[in-house]
Structure formats: C-alpha cells, structure tokens
Image: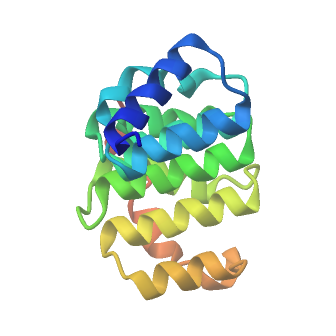
Amino acid sequence: METLNEELFHRLEALRQGTKATDEIYQTIHLFGRMNFQEARPEVERFLTNESPELRLIALLVLTQHWHLAEHWQTARHFLEQDPDRECRMTGAAALKALKRNTQDRRTLAVLARVVRNERENHLVRQAAYAAMRGILQYDPREQLRLAAHNIDLEREVDWKMVDAYLDSNNASG
C-alpha cells in the first residue's frame, strides 16, 4: 500500500505530465492544499492563469486559504478586480480576507471598499468584498456565516460609513 506522501508525489508527477482530466486536477490541487503539500507550489501556481475558472479558483484557494502565502496578496487582488468569472472574483475577496484576517490592513480594506461601492459589480461579489472587510477588521465566525448564508441588502445592511472610511485612494495604490 502506497503511503500518503508517495501518493502525493505520484499525483504531482501526473499533474506535471498533464495526464489528468479537469475534475481530477481540481481534486488533486485541493488535496495538495488540505495536506499542506507545498512541494506542489509551482504546479499549483501555474493554474492561476488557466482557462478553466474552476482551476483558477482552486489554485487561489490553496495558495491563500490553505497555505496562507502572503506573497499572493496581489494575485488575490487581481482575481477580485479583473477575473472575468464572478466566482473567481468572489474567491479573490475571500482570499484577501484569509491573508489579512484581523489585521485592519488599510491597503486591503481600501481595495475591498472600492469593490463594495462599485454599483456596476455583481451583487454577490460586492457582498463577498463586504464580508471580507468585516473579517479583516475583526473576524467573527458567526458574522461571517451570517453574511455568507443570505443575500444581504447592500443598501440597508452595509455599514457605509465604515466602507467609505477606507475609500482613500492613497491607501489602495500599489
């Protein structure tokens, strides 16, 4: 019987050779994240620009939420602001929250505030950006669950004074 470590290396080699279907790739990348198998980092990073939104999304999740790689802050920002797929943009917001939870990081809060205020952005992406702001300011698992569980009314349930306090463009540059 193959040990878990041997299985991970076997999957890594198969990923390098490109012999897996999309759903198998997704499961493999997710397994690498759950098992903290950072030996696969270069291969996982390759999928950040894949044509499949699902593979871009799982790669970002592994790098930011499983492995907490702070150097992927800009990657998460790019996903939030520029990815064509709504789910990937939502994941970008969640990734920023994962990297900056409880830090009150003004630069990240400014990026998220612009998305929350952007009326041309999808409602769910704006909601995810707001939830991320709340988690960066003070992470409360119950509040995060509540925000994720229902479509919040952006006009009535958002603390707009808080959002607007972070809109200073000087804090969002870079």
Point out residue 163 in the picture as x, y percentages from the top left corner: 47, 66
Point out residue 57 in the picture as x, y percentages from the top left corner: 60, 41
**Quadrant of the rendering where the C terminus is positioned:** top left
Q: Please tell me which residue lies in front, 84 or 156.
A: 84
Work out whether 1 lies above or below 144.
above
Work out whether 163 lies above or below 172.
below
Q: Residue at x 45, y 32 (%)?
A: 75
Work out whether 118 lies above or below 49.
below
Number of labels in the image equals 0
Residue 80 seen by the camera = no
Point out residue 122 in the picture as x, y percentages from the top left corner: 76, 54
Q: Please tell me which residue lies in front, 34 or 168.
A: 34
Place residue 45 in its image quadrant: top left
Q: Spot the residue most to the left.
A: 103
Q: Spot the residue most to the front.
A: 1
Point out residue 67 in the picture as x, y percentages from the top left corner: 32, 45
Q: Residue at x 49, y 56 (%)?
A: 94
Residue 167 seen by the camera = yes
Colour scheme: rainbow
Q: Residue at x 46, y 74 (%)?
A: 161
Q: Residue at x 61, y 84 (%)?
A: 157
Horizontal relation, residue 68 to residue 81: left or right: left
**Quadrant of the rendering where the N terminus is positioned:** top left
